[in-house]
Amino acid sequence: MGITKARVVLKGKKNKYSSTALVDTGARMSLIDESIANHVGVEPTGRKIEFMSVSGQKVQALEGIVYEFRIEEELLKYEAVAIAEIPKAVKETLMNSGLDGKVIVGLLTPERANLLPDTTTGQLKKVPSFIL
């Protein structure tokens, strides 16, 4: 099984930030490092989130709103993200793979944009949306 990556642009109340990020098929919410959240101007909601890392550690995060979250060519307005300090070892591992160490895309973000990860190509693919 390969990794999936995506071009992302985050725009907050202060700045924007562009990168190529990992699409983590094991994560629900997108995760943004505190430094990028502060730089961009992510709007905190006040909600605290606790999640389990791959290493089994409980991680505390804050929920925030990115005013514009562009993933590939799809623009999402007001995307909820988790904000936490991403550990140095995780950042280094991602950067050694040619990915951004400060943004990890969780599955809710591409799903909202009608995109699904294709681990055979390492890219996101557009899928039709439907309502049952």
Image (cartoon, rainbow, N blue to C red):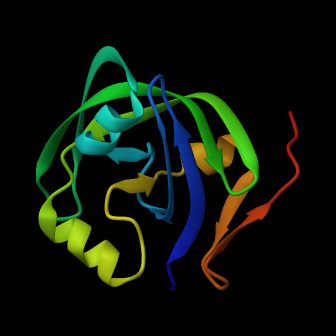
Residue 71 or 23: which is nearer the viewer? 71
* Residue 29 on image: x %, y %: 44, 42
**Picture quadrant where residue 40 is located:** top left
* Residue 75 on image: x %, y %: 72, 40
Give the farthest residue toward the front: 15
* Residue 48 on image: x %, y %: 24, 23
The answer to whether 75 is drawn above or below residue 57 in the figure is above
**Picture quadrant where residue 81 is located:** top left
* Residue 31 on image: x %, y %: 37, 46
Q: Is residue 41 left or right of residue 18?
A: left
Residue drawn at (55%, 73%) of the image: 4
Callout count: 0
Residue 92 or 17: which is nearer the viewer? 17
The answer to whether 46 is drawn above or below residue 101 in the figure is above
Q: Quadrant of the C terminus?
A: top right
Residue drawn at (29%, 33%) of the image: 38
Q: Is residue 129 left or right of residue 32?
A: right
**Picture quadrant where residue 76 is located:** top right
Residue drawn at (25%, 43%) of the image: 35
The answer to whether 1 is drawn above or below residue 127 in the figure is below
Residue drawn at (86%, 34%) of the image: 131
Q: Is residue 131 left or right of residue 103?
A: right
